[in-house]
């Protein structure tokens, strides 16, 4: 899905081919849109979440971030994690870790906005996962993590950049 915001891509942006999306065509401020593909999240051999009701956040210069409703993320796998962060668009985020019954843990592998800004009320309490800490799938495709360690973008075959988090993007 291409979001035409009327803005011009910067000269270093990769030109999207048919069926691709440029992160430079995503709007600022960001928007919420439905994710049509089934989302599956796994930690090791355990399915942590599955949803056909996910939403994704589209924001200029970032791969989409996918959020799942809390009803599709069984609380038996989630424990609170220390720390928080602040997004100028969505508000204060709280973190969680995935913990399995056998003691395996993916520390700070997911986050949510318990009380987001009014523009993002649609994802209040919804969870997003770091593809670098657990396996995330959109349809049959395994998601690749956004570079840099901090960002939680979900990189798939149709997304082109460059995007925040990659080498040389610290000044954006």
Image: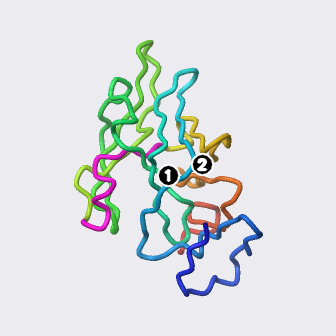
For mark 1, what is the residue?
Answer: 152
Q: Foreground residue, 67 or 113?
A: 67
Label 1 CA crowd tier, 10 Å (few <14, some 14–19, many 20+): many
Q: Please report the residue visible at 32 percent of the width from the left and 57 percent of the height from the top.
A: 122
The answer to whether residue 38 is above or below residue 148 is above
**In the image as oriented, which residue stretches furthest toward the right?**
17
Give yes or no for residue 120 being in the magenta stretch. yes
Residue 14 image position (x, y, % from top left): 72, 73
Q: CB under 8 Å between callouts 2 and 1?
A: yes
Q: Foreground residue, 134 or 16?
A: 16
> For numbered disc 1, what is the local secondary structure?
loop
Q: Please report the residue visible at 60 percent of the width from the left and 40 percent of the height from the top.
A: 137
Give the extent of the magenta segment.
118-129
Q: Foreground residue, 43 or 58?
A: 58
Mark seen at residue 46: none
Q: Please report the residue visible at 44 percent of the width from the left and 46 percent of the height from the top.
A: 53
Indicate the quadrant where residue 163 lies: bottom right
The residues bearing labels 2 and 1 have C-alpha atoms spaced at a distance of: 7 Å
For mark 2, what is the residue?
Answer: 145
Residue 49 image position (x, y, % from top left): 46, 33
Q: Left of 31 or right of it: where is 20?
A: right
Give yes or no for residue 53 being in the magenta stretch. no
């Amino acid at each position: 899905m291409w979001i035409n915001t009327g803005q011009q891509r910067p000269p270093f942006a990769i030109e999207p081919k048919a069926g691709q999306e440029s992160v430079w065509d995503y709007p600022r401020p960001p928007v919420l849109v439905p994710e049509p593909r089934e989302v599956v999240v796994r930690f090791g051999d355990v399915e942590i979440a599955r949803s056909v009701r996910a939403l994704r956040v589209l924001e200029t210069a970032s791969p989409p971030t996918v959020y799942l409703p809390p009803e599709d993320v069984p609380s038996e796998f989630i424990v609170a994690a220390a720390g928080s962060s602040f997004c100028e668009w969505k508000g204060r985020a709280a973190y969680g870790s995935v913990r399995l019954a056998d003691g395996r843990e993916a520390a700070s592998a997911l986050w949510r906005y318990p009380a987001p800004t009014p523009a993002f009320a649609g994802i209040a309490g919804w969870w997003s996962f770091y593809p670098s800490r657990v396996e995330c799938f959109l349809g049959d495709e395994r998601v690749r993590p956004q570079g840099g360690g901090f960002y939680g973008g979900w990189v798939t075959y149709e997304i082109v950049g460059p995007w925040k988090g990659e080498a040389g993007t610290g000044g954006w």
